[in-house]
Amino acid sequence: MTYQKLKGTPDFLPEDTNKWQYIEQNARKLLSRYQFKEIRTPIFEQFELFARGVGETSDIVSKEMYDFYDKGERHVALRPEGTAGVVRAFVENKLYGPEYPKPMKFYYIAPMFRYERPQKGRMRQFHQLGVEVFGNPNPSTDVETMVLAMDMFKSFGIKNLKLVINSLGNTASRTAYRQALIDYLEPQMASLSKDSKERLYKNPLRVLDSKDKKDKEIVKDAPSILDYLSEESMKHFTSVKESLEALDIEYVVDSNMVRGLDYYNDTIFEVMTEDPNFGSNTTVCAGGRYDGLVKEVGGPETAGFGFGIGLERLVMLLDNMAFDYPEVDALDAFIVTIGKSTDKEATKLAYALRKNGLNVEREFLDRKPAKQFKTADKLNASYVFTLGENEIVNGTVNVKALATGEQITMDLNELYTAQTNDLLTEIEARLKK
Ligand code: ATP
Ligand code: MG
């Protein structure tokens, strides 16, 4: 019997986790600058939460959920997206209360699960970096959050991205538009794909989102939702566009863009790549405003805005530009041992150096010094500490900087009694003298 990972699920090996850790560290720094706070919610929740929150007619709920009954006959599902769980936590923990700042700004970096046909950039377990802002109807929130999404990609030096925006208006705008769209599509019903036929009356806006070629042709000349916006929604959208222009952020309006999740209103957006390696899955970030969702999930009327970045697709963008990932846990010191009698001393030295904040690896196999130096090189160590029999007698250790070849002798006792978190700076200073 041999075992294989399930289709569409990833093993992240150390070379991968270095990438992911670097991306997460970098992302967290930027999120701090925007003052988003991390929230961690469960990987599985009541099925009903997603059905309600994401929308029964969405592909996610109707086709892609990993749902099952647990031993207590509860209908549960692995989360297919992050927003519903965060909204549930917001409501359940009463984070709308007067003691909390407004708006409340959250982020998560977490695995999501969807039963999809796996392909490049489309996994069954994938990862999203998402943010949610609660309690702020101000269009400036839309802008600040979209700018954060763009900044996230810029912070990795990613170019050739397009910010695409649209407005879905408020409920009244959507109801008026919905009818106009049905009136337009009805006469062409016979030519629509099976999926779109089904959606025509249930959720006609989703027909605009169809990936079917013929549907796309038909939809091209459909009425524009922007002609059906209420005065208030129009004002909101204009304000968003003006602020983007004031920040010199380029964008395009695509009035046929709708989102796969049903809970959005007013501003929605996608960040798309023009990277030719991407094929048809070109959306790397998607989000928008969802002022009705908190209430839908049982909370008080609360405005919401959020987005999700597909991290596998971010990694693909970085790989395609041959991004040079810094090592997140770079090796500071490798201890070379010459002669069996140095083994115990190496243990002591490694312990002391680690206590002083260094990342340390050491020789365990008593190999020839040249081999050990090769290993140190391969592991990209900054310094090699060499312990030979002479050094032990003298109570010293030879310290060599691999980048420059410079060497000094340090006193072992001094290192054992040192109490500094800045030993590296100390070594550097001595090497310079
Ligand atoms: P698509 O139209 O590509 O299926 P979606 O509308 O289902 O996208 P969202 O639910 O908005 O996507 O998720 C936000 C982002 O998460 C997407 O833009 C994409 O980058 C990423 N994403 C979605 N599904 C997957 C998946 N199965 N594997 C990897 N990344 C994904
Ligand atoms: Mg999808």
Image (cartoon, rainbow, N blue to C red):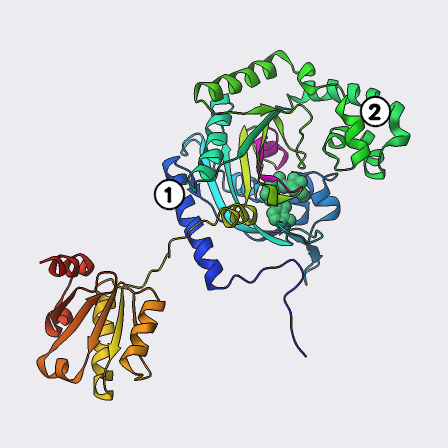
Q: Name the residue under label 1.
A: 29
Residue at image coords 57%, 28%: 301
Does the image show residue 95? yes
Residue 237 vs residue 31: left or right?
right
Residue 364 vs residue 147: left or right?
left
The image shows residue 96, relative to residue 113, as above or below, that is above
Residue 226 percent location from the top left of the image: 66, 17
Camera-side residue of 266 and 223: 223
Camera-side residue of 415 and 168: 415
Mark earlier in primary sequence (2, 1): 1
Asked if disc 2 is less than 8 Å from ligand 1, the answer is: no
Residue 144 percent location from the top left of the image: 46, 28
Rendering quadrant holding ligand 1: top right
Residue 300 percent location from the top left of the image: 56, 30
Q: What residue type is labelled 1?
A: Lys
Screen quadrant of the C terminus: bottom left
Residue 404: name its quadrant.
Answer: bottom left
The image shows residue 224, relative to residue 46, as above or below, that is above
Q: What element carries label 1?
A: helix
Q: Mark 2 points at which residue?
A: 185
Asked if disc 1 is less than 8 Å from ligand 1, the answer is: no
Badge 2: few (under 14), some or many (20 or more) residues near its Cα, within 10 Å? Answer: many
* Range drawn in magenta: 280-297
Task: Tell me how far mark 2 sits from mark 1, CA to CA.
Answer: 47 Å
Residue 37 vs residue 423: left or right?
right
Residue 130 percent location from the top left of the image: 52, 41
287 magenta-colored: yes
